[in-house]
Image (cartoon, rainbow, N blue to C red):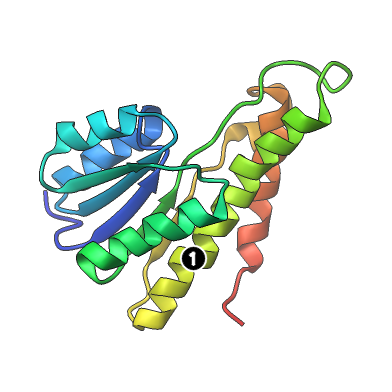
């Protein structure tokens, strides 16, 4: 199991769920990891993995935090091969009539702007290094099917599954 041997990966949302499972698998495949999450449990994930992982608490929808995790990966390893923008929030199950602009804005900030920030910062680091890399954005069936998941996450995930198709560096 060495499909990612020698690869450097950033994973956000690594404190639980898909992010934690992905971090464990990436490490098992030989990757060195920089893990981020708002929750303190991101440090538990890193401890589970051992020397192949470092962690930091960060907000995936905050540009300074995304820039910081990218900088941390570059400072430790000198490059980034994989950036996995996995962090996300549901926003609850309230319908549009019962929800607030503030709640919807927060869902968009984390679930839509967060991945965009990862593409912006990690993508630039990959382009500047001249080696390319892979950027993975977690989407959801909630973005393509009505009734799947929390209502606000459906809107944000739909948007986050469309815009990456047209991303380019110029």
| Residue 49 horizontal side relative to residue 147, left or right | left
Identify which residue is drawn at 18% across, 56% down. 3
Residue 163: horizontal and vertical position, in percent?
67, 58
| Residue 56 horizontal side relative to residue 29, left or right | right
Residue 33: horizontal and vertical position, in percent?
24, 51
Residue 105: horizontal and vertical position, in percent?
74, 38
Identify which residue is drawn at 32% across, 45% down. 35
Q: Residues within 10 Å of mark 1 (few under 14, many from 20)?
A: some
For the residue pair 21 and 89, the one nearer the viewer reads as 89
Q: Quarter of the image containing the C terminus?
A: bottom right
Identify which residue is drawn at 25% across, 60% down. 8
Identify whether 23 is placed above or below 67.
Answer: above
Identify whether 100 is placed above or below 69.
Answer: above
Identify which residue is drawn at 19% across, 54% down. 32
Q: Is residue 145 something one can see in this rendering?
A: no
Disc 1 is placed on an element classified as: helix
For the residue pair 55 and 166, the one nearer the viewer reads as 55
Residue 148: horizontal and vertical position, in percent?
65, 24
């Amino acid at each position: 199991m060495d499909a990612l041997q020698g690869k450097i990966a950033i994973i956000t949302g690594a404190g639980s769920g898909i992010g934690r499972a992905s971090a464990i698998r990436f490490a098992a495949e030989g990757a060195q990891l920089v893990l981020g999450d708002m929750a303190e449990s991101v440090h538990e994930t890193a401890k589970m993995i051992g020397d192949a992982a470092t962690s930091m608490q960060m907000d995936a929808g905050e540009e300074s935090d995304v820039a910081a995790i990218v900088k941390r990966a570059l400072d430790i390893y000198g490059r980034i091969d994989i950036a996995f923008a996995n962090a996300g929030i549901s926003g609850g199950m309230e319908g549009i009539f019962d929800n607030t602009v503030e709640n919807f804005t927060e869902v968009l900030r984390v679930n839509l702007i967060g991945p965009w920030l990862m593409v912006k910062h990690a993508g630039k680091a990959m382009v500047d290094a001249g080696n390319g890399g892979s950027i993975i954005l977690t989407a959801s069936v909630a973005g393509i099917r009505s009734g799947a998941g929390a209502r606000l996450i459906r809107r944000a995930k739909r948007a986050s599954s469309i815009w990456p198709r047209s991303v380019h560096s110029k």
